[in-house]
Image (tube, rainbow, N blue to C red):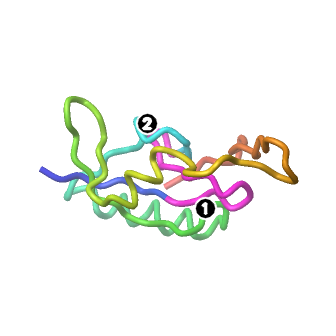
Amino acid sequence: MSKEILTGNELISGATVYLSASGDWVEALSAARLFEKEDAAERDGAVAATKATGRVISLEIEEVDVVDGQIVPKRLRERIRAAGPTAPLTLHGQAYDRQHLGEDGHVSI
C-alpha cells in the first residue's frame, strides 16, 4: 500500500529536505515521516505550516513504497533527488559546502 511523504527544497541552500516524524525538515529520506490516507488532515496542516514559514519551497506530497524497510519514491524524479546532486557542488571552482538546516527547521503542526 502506498504511503506519502512531504518533500521540498530548503530555501537558502536548495537542499532536498523531507519532513520527519518529529516535525523537523531533514536531508535523509530514510527519516521522512510516512503519512497514511487517514493522516491527510495532519499532512495538509504540515503543508500549510511549512508554506507559512517560507523556509522550504517547492513543497510536494510524494507517493512512496516501503520496500525491505527502505522508503522508495514512486516517481523517478524523486528517486534522483533523494540520491543527491547529479553534478559536483562547486562555487568559483572550489568545493562548496552549502549551508544546512539550522535549529529553526522545525514545523509545528
Residue sitting at the far left: 1
Q: Could you say which is closer to the camera, residue 62 or residue 78? A: 78
Q: Residues within 10 Å of mark 2 (few under 14, many from 20)?
A: some
Q: Are marks 1 and 2 in contact (CB under 8 Å)?
A: no
Q: Could you say which is closer to the camera, residue 77 or residue 27? A: 77
Q: CA distance from mark 1 to mark 2?
A: 17 Å
- 11 sits left or right of 21 in the view: right
Q: Residues within 10 Å of mark 1 (few under 14, many from 20)?
A: many
Residue sitting at the far top: 68
- The residue under label 1 is 56
Image label count: 2
**Does the stretch in magenta take in 108?**
no
Give me the residue at 33% from left, 58% from top: 76
| Disc number for residue 31 | 2
Q: Secondary structure at mark 2?
A: helix
**In this picture, is 11 found above or below 23?**
below
Image: magenta residue range: 8-23
Q: Position of residue 42 (x, y in %)?
A: 36, 58
**In this picture, is 47 found above or below 15?**
below
Q: Amino acid at mark 2?
A: Ala
- 98 sits left or right of 73 in the view: right
Give me the residue at 29% from left, 34% from top: 70
Q: Amino acid at mark 1?
A: Val
